[in-house]
């Protein structure tokens, strides 16, 4: 083993000595102050600059730059022990608002596409655009997209003005929904009259509005009903009136038929022809005799618990959004106050 060259023992970094023969500490005295400064900065926040980023130690006694390009943002470390939970709430608010923004834009595009496809903006049809159901999709999509986008940008940029606008709008929506629920509960008798008027209007415009035709057919097929109060309500339609010259005279739409396919695969559009001329005993084997108002009332009574649960969950989500927004506003305000105190301490 004597042929191996001899080396001195390797000195670990804590055993090394400086030029004065003193052991080098793990952290030098100069670096201690830098470490304390970095720890304070990590607690109070981080600085972001569009240009070069430089940091100064407390021993240098240099005042930090206050240029407009440098801005303060809070991080999990700057929020104390509850930092990570607040950080998660912030990005939960951002992601949920992104989802509702996409949903609102899809609803807006659907409503706009429906209006354009039916040429509702044409001069001869513009007078009836107020009763077009696609207008409801257009309005709801626009409100949902704008509101969700405001909340998303406000949370992402930590903009207190946008967050306050978003919080106020959500609060007003919650109040409006509660008042609407109370009004619906206290005006049950009047609501039946409004539903009857809406159903009769849809019957009158059955051939003129494709959306109303689709909605009417879906209601009659799913609830197994025909007309508002009875199948004879279809007499008010100019095409199904018994005095009409066409083949549909004294008839009803195929969605009123018990078996519109007639054991086949193709929809038989003539299955309700002449149904109004039949007596009720003969007609009951061909079409549904009961009106849709009674079917709607029975459906709401049967599914009342589900409807109430859905309403409570939706209101709960909106109220939870208000609490998350208020929490985020409080943390932004607190962090900015700590940042100001930090800057004053450096002066």
Image (cartoon, helix red, strand yellow):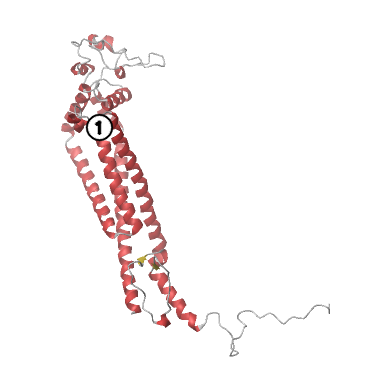
Closer to the camera in the image, 263 or 341 = 341
User: Which residue occupies 61% across, 79% down?
Assistant: 13
188 left or right of 25 in image? left
User: Which residue occupies 31% across, 49% down?
Assistant: 149
Residue 225: where, in percent of width, then height? 28, 21
Residue 179: where, in percent of width, then height? 19, 44
Q: Quadrant of residue 238?
A: top left
Total number of numbered labels? 1
In the image, residue 126 sits, relative to residue 91, either above or below, namely above
Closer to the camera in the image, 119 or 107 = 119
In the image, residue 232 sits, relative to residue 193, either above or below, namely above
For disc 1, the neighbor class at 10 Å (few under 14, some 14 to 19, many from 20) is some
Residue 152: where, in percent of width, then height? 34, 52
> Considering the image in quadrants, where does the N terminus appear?
bottom right
Query: Does residue 68 appear anywhere in the picture?
Result: yes
Q: Quadrant of residue 213?
A: top left
């Amino acid at each position: 083993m004597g042929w191996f060259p001899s080396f001195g023992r390797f000195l670990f970094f804590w055993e090394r000595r400086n030029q004065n023969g003193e052991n080098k500490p793990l952290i030098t005295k100069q670096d201690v102050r830098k470490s304390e400064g970095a720890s304070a900065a990590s607690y109070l926040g981080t600085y972001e600059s569009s240009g070069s980023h430089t940091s100064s130690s407390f021993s240098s006694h240099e005042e930090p730059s206050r240029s407009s390009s440098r801005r303060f943002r809070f991080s999990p470390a700057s929020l104390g022990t509850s930092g990570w939970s607040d950080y998660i709430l912030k990005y939960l608010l951002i992601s949920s608002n992104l989802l509702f923004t996409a949903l609102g834009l899809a609803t807006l595009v659907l409503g706009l596409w429906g209006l354009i496809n039916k040429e509702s903006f044409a001069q001869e049809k513009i007078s009836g655009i107020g009763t077009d159901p696609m207008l409801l999709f257009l309005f709801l999509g626009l409100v949902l997209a704008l509101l969700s986008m405001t909340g998303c940008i406000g949370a992402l940029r930590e903009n207190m003005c946008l967050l306050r606008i978003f919080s106020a709008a959500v609060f007003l929506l919650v109040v409006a929904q509660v008042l609407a629920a109370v009004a619906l509960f206290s005006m049950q008798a009047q609501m039946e009259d409004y539903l009857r008027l809406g159903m009769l209007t849809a019957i009158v415009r059955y051939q003129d509005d494709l959306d109303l035709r689709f909605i009417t057919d879906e209601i009659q097929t799913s609830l197994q009903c025909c007309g508002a109060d009875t199948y004879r309500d279809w007499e008010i339609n100019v095409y199904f009136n018994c005095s009409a010259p066409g083949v549909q005279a004294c008839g009803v739409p195929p969605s009123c038929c018990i078996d519109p396919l007639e054991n086949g695969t193709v929809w038989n559009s003539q299955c309700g022809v002449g149904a109004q001329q039949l007596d009720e005993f003969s007609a009951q084997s061909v079409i549904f005799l009961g009106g849709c108002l009674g079917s709607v009332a029975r459906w709401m009574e049967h599914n009342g618990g589900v409807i109430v649960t859905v309403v409570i969950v939706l209101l709960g989500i909106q109220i939870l959004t208000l609490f998350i927004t208020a929490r985020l506003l409080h943390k932004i305000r607190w962090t900015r106050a700590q940042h100001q105190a930090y800057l004053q301490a450096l002066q």
